[in-house]
Image (cartoon, helix red, strand yellow):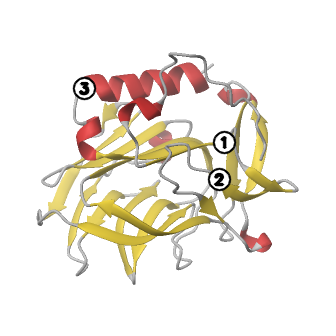
């Protein structure tokens, strides 16, 4: 375990205040050399991201000057990824990622159930956040403005509340068009993939400083989203 800057002052606001289903921050990782073997979940729910294959382990960058010298996890487009198997997620979730550089299109987050990617955050590109049910029927948001300038060195938030999808870049709603149909709420068990889908589809070359999954209701209010963005700004923006 690499403790890094793991001290949190008493009473300090962190994403844990919003009761995340999972929360990862790059100051606490398990390394083999400079590569990430595991990224522990700080939510208390045990959703630990791991990679046993050294060839496809992402690397840890100890300090990034443009992000207040905070560490990040970095993957290339050759397929590095971290996974957590057997994770049950509600259909109505919010996915939050704090990015650094992004060099290619690809998955930042996936939840793979069989051959169906039931939730994903894809950056950059047109389909920013997609949700599908167990049969693969889609409900997703498409954003023509989801360009590189909208995702590099940003906090990105995708929310599906059971009826609509919203995507935020640095807490600004991108107001893209949404297509698909709402479907009944359900829980789905699958494998989380960070930086790439666990089935090897669409790896991304990017940096992630922090990521979390929340019940959608926890990010429904303007004040909750503002608090999460203020935390990201204070921690990572010079």
x%, y% of residue 49? 59, 60
Residue at coordinates 47% horizontally, 51% vertically from top-left?
45
Quarter of the figure that contains the C terminus: top right
For label 2, the SS is strand
Tag 2–tag 1 contact (CB < 8 Å) = yes
Instruction: Please give left or right for residue 179 compared with residue 129 in the image.
Output: left
The numbered disc on residue 39 is 2
Q: Nearer the viewer, residue 63 or 105?
A: 63
Q: Gap between marks 2 and 1, in whole Å? A: 8 Å
- Dot 3 or dot 1: first in sequence order is 1
Cα distance, mark 2 to mark 3? 30 Å
Q: Residue at x 31, y 27 (%)?
A: 224
Residue at (52, 55) in percent of width and height:
46
Looking at the rendered structure, the secondary structure element under dot 3 is helix
Frontmost residue, 69 versus 186: 186
Left/right of residue 127 with respect to residue 195 in the rendered view:
left
Report the residue marked by disc 1. 26
- Dot 1 alpha-carbon crowd within 10 angstroms: few under 14, some 14 to 19, many 20 or more: many
User: How many numbered dots are placed on residues in this image?
Assistant: 3
Query: Is residue 197 shown to the viewer in this render?
Result: yes
Task: Specify which label sits upstream in the sequence, 2 or 1.
Answer: 1
* The quadrant where residue 175 appears: top left
Numbered tag placed on residue 231 in the rendering:
none
Residue 143 horizontal side relative to residue 43, left or right: left
Write down the residue under mark 3: 222
Measuring 47% from the left and 53% from the top, which residue is drawn there? 124
Q: Nearer the viewer, mark 2 or mark 1?
A: 2
Side of 228 relative to 64 (left or right): left
Disc 3 and disc 1: Cα gap in Å?
Answer: 27 Å
Q: Where residue 188 sits: x, y (%)?
A: 30, 70
**Quick one: SS at disc 1?**
loop
Q: Is 93 drawn above or below residue 174 in the view shown? A: below
């Amino acid at each position: 375990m690499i403790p890094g800057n793991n001290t949190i002052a008493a009473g300090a606001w962190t994403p844990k205040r919003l009761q995340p289903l999972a929360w990862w921050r790059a100051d606490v990782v398990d390394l083999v050399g400079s590569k990430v073997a595991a990224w522990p979940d700080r939510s208390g729910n045990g959703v630990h991201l791991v990679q046993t294959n050294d060839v496809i382990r992402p690397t840890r960058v100890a300090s990034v000057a443009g992000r207040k010298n905070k560490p990040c996890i970095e993957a290339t487009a050759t397929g590095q990824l971290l996974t957590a198997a057997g994770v049950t997620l509600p259909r109505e979730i919010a996915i939050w990622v704090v990015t650094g550089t992004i060099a290619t299109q690809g998955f930042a987050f996936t939840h793979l159930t069989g051959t169906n990617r039931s939730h994903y955050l894809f950056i950059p590109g047109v389909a920013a956040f997609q949700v599908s049910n167990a049969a693969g029927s889609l409900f997703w948001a498409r954003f023509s403005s989801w360009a590189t300038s909208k995702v590099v060195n940003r906090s990105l938030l995708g929310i599906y509340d059971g009826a609509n999808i919203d995507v935020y870049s640095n807490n600004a709603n991108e107001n893209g068009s949404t297509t698909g149909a709402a479907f009944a709420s359900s829980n789905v068990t699958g494998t989380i993939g960070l930086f790439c889908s666990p089935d090897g589809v669409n790896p991304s070359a990017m940096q992630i400083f922090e990521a979390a999954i929340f019940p959608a209701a926890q990010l429904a209010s303007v004040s909750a989203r503002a608090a999460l963005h203020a935390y990201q700004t204070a921690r990572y923006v010079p």
